[in-house]
Image (tube, rainbow, N blue to C red):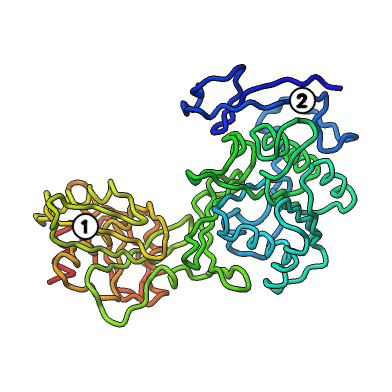
Amino acid sequence: MAKTKTTFFCQNCGTQHAKWVGQCSACKEWNTIVEEVVQKEEKRSWKQSSSIKKTSKPLTIAQIESNPEERIQTKNKELDTVLGGGLVKGSVILLGGEPGIGKSTLILQIALSITQKVLYVSGEESQSQIKMRAERIQNQNENCFILTATNTQEIFKNIEEIQPDFLVIDSIQTLQTNTVEATPGSISQIRETTAELIQFAKETATPVLLIGHINKEGHIAGPKILEHMVDVVLQFEGDRNHTYRILRAQKNRFGSTSELGIYEMLSDGLREISNPSEILISKKDSDLSGSAIASTLEGVRPLMIEVQALVSTAVYGTPQRSTTGYNLKRLNMILAVLEKRAGFKLGAKDVFLNITGGIQVDDPAIDLAVVAAILSSNEDIAINPNVCFAAEVGLAGEIRPVSKIDQRIIEAEKLGYKTLVASKYNNISSKNHNIKLVLVGKIEEAFATLFA
């Protein structure tokens, strides 16, 4: 029998301590240290009789063979785009999101549509519950096997029998291994079970997808080292009161982290949104002030989004500044530029800004659209709905150029916009565009163009 000992772990960051302390020395959080019983084993392997032994030696860059990454297509274009082209063999993917947001529905849809053999392991639902969801999705796949289990040793026995090409774990917080004596969901259990699954993925070149819970702060529950151990960290976002969901990559060793996938939650599952601009621009019967269309980029995908602003007199003395989907500090900077450089008196007025569709935007190219929406609301003059914007605003009040302007112009053309306002300092290619380009250098020029 292996020797059993007690150790102390921080529930917030996973740091191990020799004794109980009130404050974690790593993350500086208070009252997060808990005691766990750890049983040491000589061997921690996904397969006790593993015959795969790999040795490595140092090589120069020239000696290393550059093998192209083999990817498995999931037949879900949004997920493939976010992952960088599909599932890389041997990769470990962690998907996090709020309860009820649709994580299990998304992964079950993929498991039922993929052509390879899939083992879907659930520690939260019974097989009959998963069958009910599969019937609602109306998808059938003879190569998808459903297993209800929480013990990793039992899971690996079934893996040896089925030999799947793709493994799904729902969720990692429900698993437990015999190598440690701790409750499921504890720091040591999450770390050990994840390590076993990573070892299995790397030795067999099988992609593994882990679904993870999140805590009240919105971060993936468990030790922070969990996100360092896996290859890809995906975040499934959205408001349960709305039908749209956004899939983002927070970490990706095989592709970009700036890609975006958008879905619509329906009664029969999640529908891929191939044209995100259709949900990000609201439908309205009449032209209203305080609304402007901006061209932004998420990775390599251009999007047209709607920026809404409301400017009103501050009735409570202190002006309010509020944003949804936009950086509040950047809004304050733009308001200061409008007052100092352009002469618009907004210091005594409330300003509220909203990016429609529930999307969070960090692209500085929407600055000019923010300025246009604020001035439109302040003057109570509607902007022509066929006009869109793509430019950054500097502290001197100048209109600065943005990257990949040609892609933004092409997207605006495709969606039927007639005019695009951009910086005159942009190096726009000489190709002929079927859209009118208005090039400005200062905020005053943009104001005169829009509200003359």
- Whole-percent x, y for residue 359 in the image: 42, 59
* C-alpha gap between disc 1 and disc 2: 58 Å
Q: Identify the image quadrant of residue 5.
A: top right
Q: Please indicate, yes or no, whether residue 428 appears anywhere in the rendered image.
A: yes
Query: Which dot, 1 or 2, sits closer to the camera?
Result: 2
Question: Can you say whether 345 is above or below 173 in the image?
Answer: below
Question: Can you say whether 20 is above or below 403 in the image?
Answer: above
What is the number of callouts on the image? 2
**Extreme residue toward the top, this view:** 18
Q: Identify the image quadrant of residue 84.
A: bottom right
- Whole-percent x, y for residue 275 in the image: 49, 70
User: Which comes sooner in the sequence, label 1 or label 2?
Assistant: 2
Element carrying mark 1: strand
Type of the residue with mark 1: Val
Q: Which residue: 51% across, 59% down?
A: 246
Residue holding disc 2: 39
Type of the residue with mark 2: Gln
Q: Please indicate, yes or no, whether residue 51 appears anywhere in the rendered image.
A: no
The reply to whether callout 1 and callout 2 are in contact (CB within 8 Å) is no
Q: Which residue: 73% across, 63% down?
A: 130
Q: Nearer the viewer, residue 387 or 236?
A: 236
- Whole-percent x, y for residue 43 in the image: 83, 27
Residue holding disc 1: 351
Q: Nearer the viewer, residue 404 or 311?
A: 311
Query: How crowded is the residue under tag 2: few (<14 C-alpha within 10 Å), some, or many (20+)?
Result: some
**Extreme residue toward the bottom, this view:** 285
